[in-house]
Image (cartoon, rainbow, N blue to C red):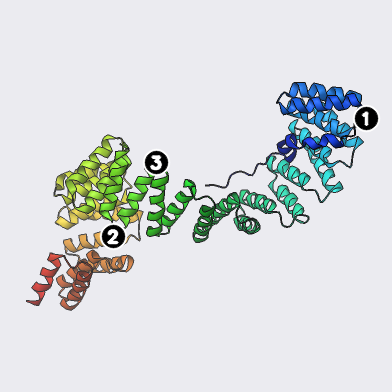
Amino acid sequence: MAVVGCVYPSYASKHIVNFFPDEEVNVLNLDTTRAKAHYLAGTRYEALGDLEKALAEYEKAFEKDSANFNILLRLGNAQYRLKRFPEAQKTFEIASKMFPEYYLGHIMLATIYYAQGKISDSERIYKKAILNNPDELTAYVGLGALYIQENRITEAIETHRNALKFFPDDPTLYFKIGLLYSKDKKINKAVEYLLKSCELDSDWLQAKLALAVAYEISEQYEEAINVYKEAILINPSDVNIYRRLAELSDFKNKLEDAEKYYSILVYLDPSNLRNYISLGSIYLQENKLQDALSIVQKGREKNFEVPEIFLLLGLIYFRLGDTDQSIAAYLRAVELGGNKNLVYFHLGAAYEQSGHYEMAIETFKYVIENDPGNANALNYLGYMYAERGENLAEAIRLIKKAIEKEPNNGAFIDSLGWAYYKQGRLLEATRLLKKAEKLVGDDPVVIEHLGDVYYKRGMKDLAIKKWKKALEFNPDRAELKEKLEKVYD
């Protein structure tokens, strides 16, 4: 959600048409009975939506009584609504001169000036209205709207802040100032005023959403989440708020919360494919593979035959160890027009895991040919060569190219160290694998590799230490158990 542009219609143009209550007839004090009759006829036509007839009656009333502010107001407003701006301007100029104490006449005149593009005249009248009636809010709002529409943001902020001197507890003013600061890219000030607006009106949904967005822009994500939680209590069925909560929770790695909010989205918005894919991805991150498979299948039942859902399905089957189903899903994603470089990378991994080594090589070569800077594909193909102890010079070239793209990627550095190990360059391998261990932490593959290098260098105690540590993280790895058994024999 972005903070939307801060363009407000003039107060008068927005509200004047509904300004007049029926009870006004009792206090019109019209000079003649006929003026009153025409006036009343005009109000009735206006109520029926026939502005042309209403205008004709107001003109007749004006002819009978040209010194009545109520008649001038109705007449000018009808002219304004019918976009007869020069006539409306003339009417309200008369009203403002004859009745300078009547605030609304000045506001309407300023509005009509602006409608005709007479910006300086409109600004002058708004300022005059503020000077004569500094404790009336309407002129501040109108002048502020003018500045906003003219992109004079600093002046708009100043105008609304001046209004705060007379209306210090008005949440709308704080809200508008907050949006203006946001538009001016002064997000900390925006947060300050939006927060005050929410304090003054804790049930104002729009203010809370604006505050949450400002927190997001300033990367105060926890605060944003908390405000969105308050907002959802005001409107419990707002799918957009749930979506922000879900996405922010996912971004902050709060997977349990993300799962909860995406589950609600699937319920509230069951026709939206994005919800099924997002919830399935969360389940995949949580290693809830059967739940992930179930929600993706529900999405498919909605006839969502799109590449994204088959890519996710392929990832789930891959994690479940069903590489045949995984490959089939990836191929279907390609048929449906999915991003080949993205899908083929995962397809190559599935081919490699299923033992289709040559097909895996060709698939990764395709990705690299079409996306030469794809660091993951470069590393994966290089590591495949290194793992098999073949084409080692090419393996090192590929992995080095991947490291150029991501120099602090511990997995890539591990791959290069392993390739050096396969070449017998044990000192270089040791240095790189120790660096990889520092970067990735407790990764059993890196730790085992380092143990293998120590063993090859005759440093058995260090090798045993590393292998035992790797086994703690991967206790079912038979090859690692065999290494330990062999070294103890």
283 up-or-down from 274: above or below = below
Q: Quadrant of the C terminus?
A: bottom left
Q: Residues within 10 Å of mark 1 (few under 14, many from 20)?
A: few
Disc 3 residue type (three-letter): Asn
Q: Quadrant of residue 195?
A: bottom right
293 up-or-down from 105: above or below = below
Q: Nearer the viewer, mark 2 or mark 3?
A: 3
Question: Where's residue 285, x and y in %?
Answer: 32, 56
Of the residues under marks 2 and 3, which one precedes in the sequence? 3
Which residue is pictured at 32% across the width and 54% down the height?
283
Disc 2 to disc 1, C-alpha distance: 92 Å
95 up-or-down from 148: above or below = above
Residue located farthest toward the bottom when viewing the structure as drawn:
461
Question: Where's residue 397, x and y in %?
Answer: 25, 53
- Which residue is labeled 3 in the image? 272
447 left or right, relative to 40: left
Of the residues under marks 3 and 1, which one precedes in the sequence? 1
Q: Nearer the viewer, residue 114 or 120?
A: 114
Q: Mark 1 and mark 3 in contact (Cβ < 8 Å)?
A: no
Q: Nearer the viewer, residue 213 or 335?
A: 213
Disc 2 residue type (three-letter): Ala
Q: Quadrant of residue 308?
A: top left
**Element under label 2?**
helix
- Which residue is labeled 2 in the image? 411
Residue 31 has which mark?
1
Q: Mark 3 and mark 2 in contact (Cβ < 8 Å)?
A: no
**Element under label 3?**
loop
**Residue 86 visible somewhere in the drawing:** no
Disc 1 residue type (three-letter): Asp
Q: Residues within 10 Å of mark 2 (few under 14, many from 20)?
A: many
176 left or right, relative to 109: left
